[in-house]
């Protein structure tokens, strides 16, 4: 297995976020991290300050070639044609790679301080958060840049470097190793960190609380295909099974204007937002008006899984051509008080109540417990349909089999399609659809305005995001193309 220098990976952070900001957020002042409070301050930076929502949506089966009048965006264009985006700044795979390793560096710095403390028990909560945050950043990296976990192949599929120590030398060699190895390390960090997690935060939505940590664990085990663990982690997240009262409350947005809806959707007070990320991103500026986006027909179709319209969503259009669900709010931070230039930020939901519920539903499907899966799917439907009536809107096995009869006669596959279509509706614009398509190796088809059909087949190497080219300076092979 080839080795390379982690310094070159982290150098991407300096290129795309700037030396000054990186040093401000991850100070190399180990001797000052001598209290739990100071370690907690450092852990604010242990979460990736980037997202790949726009790229993920563009690669999925959600968008169409909507109109030549759409905004030209390199991330959107690269994603739709499954080519490596020309843009290497925010919202790109290069930028996200650097943001994740920056977060990992902060987590490792915090863990080093916890382990060296004279009274390590006082740092228990900080160590738990650092371990789970480190696991999360590595999990997102392996999910995007490597093949999906498969027990038959993950022992040889290239993973991503799992970094567990703070950098103390300028040059240090790391192995990329395998997907299986990365999953082993993620699970190790999760198991150690979860019992230490605390809920004592002033702004809990931006940290791994117990609920958020178990939510992440449910996603991890779904990808690992350990369905018993998915169910148990979902139950740990919501021991009272109170999913319905803790979803994102779309009905309450009915009287709000567009701006207020966006703010509330990504607010820390939104009960469905179990973990929110503060990200450097233009997702809020671009997701609703790019060429490769959604028409009215496509949006209405996607947000009506199995013919059940999620009518509680606040839908809008741009130029009566580009249709979208109102979700993201753009925060613009000026370079200086009087400057006209600055940086766009977006608060984005990273883990949600709805995802945990659907993770459990899918696990029930794979376990053959279709009654429990129906209960979970209908629970979400009950809070997404105006004028909800169980007799009218609830799914039944007969409805599911009839709806998917043209594509499958297998009961389990029909139920799985139902879960995935409900998730597709719930998480439109949030990148979850791509993660499901990649995880399950589902082919994707795009059709251009001129009728050209483009297909991304199962196992196509373009399903893996490309690593930053800088890593080749250490002899690391990029993902195949």
Image (tube, helix red, strand yellow):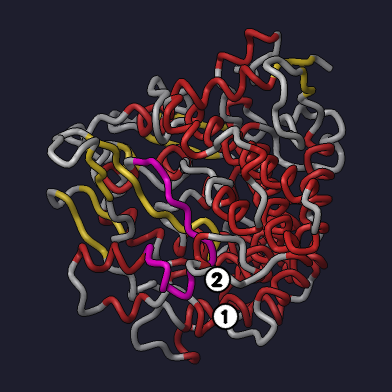
As for residue 274 lying within the magenta part, the answer is yes
Residue found at x 85% / y 43%? 151
Rendered image: mark on residue 243 = 1
Query: Contact, CB < 8 Å: mark 1 with mark 2?
Result: yes
Using residue 187 as the reference point, say whether residue 200 is left or right of it.
left
Secondary structure of the residue carrying tag 1 is: loop
- In this picture, is 164 found above or below 270? above
The percent position of residue 9, horizontal first and vertical second, equals 61, 22
| Magenta span | 266-281
Density class for disc 2 (Cα within 10 Å; few <14, some 14-19, many ≥20) is many
Rendered image: mark on residue 353 = 2
Report the quarter where the N terminus lies: top right
> Does residue 343 show up?
yes
- In this picture, is 431 found above or below 301? above
Density class for disc 1 (Cα within 10 Å; few <14, some 14-19, many ≥20) is some
The percent position of residue 314, horizontal first and vertical second, equals 28, 68
Secondary structure of the residue carrying tag 2 is: helix
First of labels 1, 2 by sequence position: 1
Report the quarter where the C terminus lies: top right
Residue found at x 62% / y 17%? 8
């Amino acid at each position: 297995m080839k080795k390379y220098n982690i310094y070159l990976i982290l150098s991407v952070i300096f290129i795309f976020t700037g030396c000054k900001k990186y040093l401000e957020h991850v100070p190399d002042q180990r001797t000052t991290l001598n209290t739990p409070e100071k370690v907690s301050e450092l852990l604010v930076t242990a979460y990736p300050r980037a997202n790949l929502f726009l790229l993920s949506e563009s690669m999925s089966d959600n968008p169409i070639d909507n109109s030549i009048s759409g905004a030209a965006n390199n991330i959107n264009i690269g994603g739709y044609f499954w080519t490596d985006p020309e843009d290497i700044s925010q919202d790109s795979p290069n930028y996200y790679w650097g943001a994740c390793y920056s977060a990992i560096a902060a987590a490792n710095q915090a863990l080093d301080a916890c382990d060296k403390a004279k009274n390590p028990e006082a740092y228990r909560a900080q160590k738990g958060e650092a371990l789970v945050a480190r696991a999360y950043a590595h999990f997102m990296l392996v999910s995007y840049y490597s093949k999906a976990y498969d027990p038959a192949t993950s022992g040889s599929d290239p993973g991503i470097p799992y970094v567990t120590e703070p950098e103390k030398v300028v040059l240090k060699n790391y192995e990329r190793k395998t997907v299986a190895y990365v999953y082993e390390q993620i699970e190790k960090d999760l198991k150690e960190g979860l019992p230490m997690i605390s809920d004592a935060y002033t702004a809990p939505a931006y940290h791994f609380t117990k609920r958020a940590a178990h939510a992440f664990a449910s996603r991890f085990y779904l990808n690992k295909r350990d369905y018993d663990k998915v169910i148990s982690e979902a139950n740990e997240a919501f021991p009272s099974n109170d999913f319905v009262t803790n979803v994102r409350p779309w009905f309450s947005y009915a009287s709000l204007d567009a701006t207020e809806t966006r703010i509330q959707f990504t607010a820390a007070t939104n009960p469905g937002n179990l973990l929110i990320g503060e990200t450097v991103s233009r997702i809020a500026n671009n997701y609703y008006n790019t060429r490769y986006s959604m028409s009215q027909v496509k949006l209405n179709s996607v947000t009506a899984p199995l013919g059940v319209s999620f009518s509680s969503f606040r839908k809008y259009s741009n130029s009566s051509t580009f249709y979208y669900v109102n979700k993201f709010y753009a925060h613009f931070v000026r370079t200086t008080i009087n400057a006209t230039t600055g940086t766009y930020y977006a608060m984005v939901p990273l883990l949600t109540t709805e995802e945990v519920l659907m993770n459990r539903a899918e696990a029930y499907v794979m376990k053959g417990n279709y009654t429990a899966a129906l209960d979970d799917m209908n629970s979400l439907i009950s809070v997404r349909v105006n004028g909800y009536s169980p007799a009218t809107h609830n799914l039944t096995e007969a409805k599911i089999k009839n709806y998917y009869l043209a594509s499958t006669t297998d009961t389990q596959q029909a139920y799985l399609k139902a879960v995935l279509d409900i998730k597709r509706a719930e998480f439109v614009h949030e990148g979850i659809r791509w993660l499901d398509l990649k995880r399950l190796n589902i082919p994707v088809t795009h059709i251009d305005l001129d009728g050209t059909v483009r297909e991304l087949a199962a196992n196509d190497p373009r399903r893996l995001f490309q690593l930053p080219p800088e890593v080749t300076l250490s002899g690391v092979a990029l993902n195949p193309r």
